[in-house]
Amino acid sequence: MSYLFPSFLIAQDSNRNPNTLTIAANSTAVDSVAVTGTAQTITVPTDANGKPPRIINFSSTGNFYVNFGTTAVVPTTTTTAGAASILNPGARSISGITSFSIIAPSNCIVTMEWYS
């Protein structure tokens, strides 16, 4: 395997052509219980050397919203100003972000995997 980033690996076939992207084991995982309609602020953790992770991967037992710039809200109207919360965001680069907000329209568990 060759490395794309320390946490993401690209496997090669017998002709050395890249053919599979694999995520390495995460360095930290955090679970948060998202309570209906209650925004939570999540602080980005640091490792033993004070270094924050570069990538986060979200998963959940239900729908949830994330906002990396302000307090997350469950949308009830159209937002066109560019500050809308993101539904079930998956993996994201979080370089330079120290905290973010999550909210859910109904109770669920949100798991956050952090990668350095």
Image (cartoon, grey):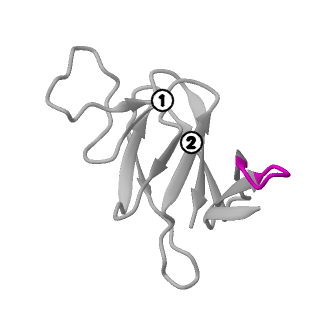
Q: Position of residue 99 (x, y in %)?
A: 37, 57
- Mark 2, residues whose alpha carbon is within 10 Å: few (<14), some, or many (≥20)? some
Q: In this view, which residue lies farthest toward the top?
A: 77
User: Is-magenta flag for residue 17?
Assistant: yes
* Dominant secondary structure of the residues highlighted in magenta in the image: loop
User: Quadrant of the image for the N terminus?
Assistant: bottom right
- Over which residues does the magenta segment extend? 12-18
Disc 1 marks which amino acid? Phe
Q: Residues within 10 Å of mark 1 (few under 14, many from 20)?
A: many
Residue 7 falls left or right of residue 79? right
Q: Quadrant of residue 107?
A: top right
The residue at the far front in this view is 15
Q: Is residue 103 magenta?
A: no
Q: CA distance from mark 2 to mark 1?
A: 10 Å
User: What residue sits 45% from the left and 62% below the top?
Assistant: 44
Occupied quadrant, residue 103: top left
Kind of residue at disc 2: Phe
Query: SS class of the residue under badge 2?
Result: strand
Contact? badges 2 and 1 (CB < 8 Å):
yes
Dot 2 or dot 1: first in sequence order is 2
The correct choice, above or below, for 70 with respect to 89 in the image is below
Hey, which residue is sitting farthest bottom in the picture?
49
- Which residue is more in the foreground, 113 or 2? 2
Instruction: Please give the label number shown on residue 58.
Output: 2
Q: Residue at x 47, y 70 (%)?
A: 52
Q: Residue at x 49, y 77 (%)?
A: 51
Label 1 secondary element: loop
Name the quadrant of the C terminus: bottom right
List the residue tagged with mark 1: 64
Residue 85 image-quadrant placement = top left
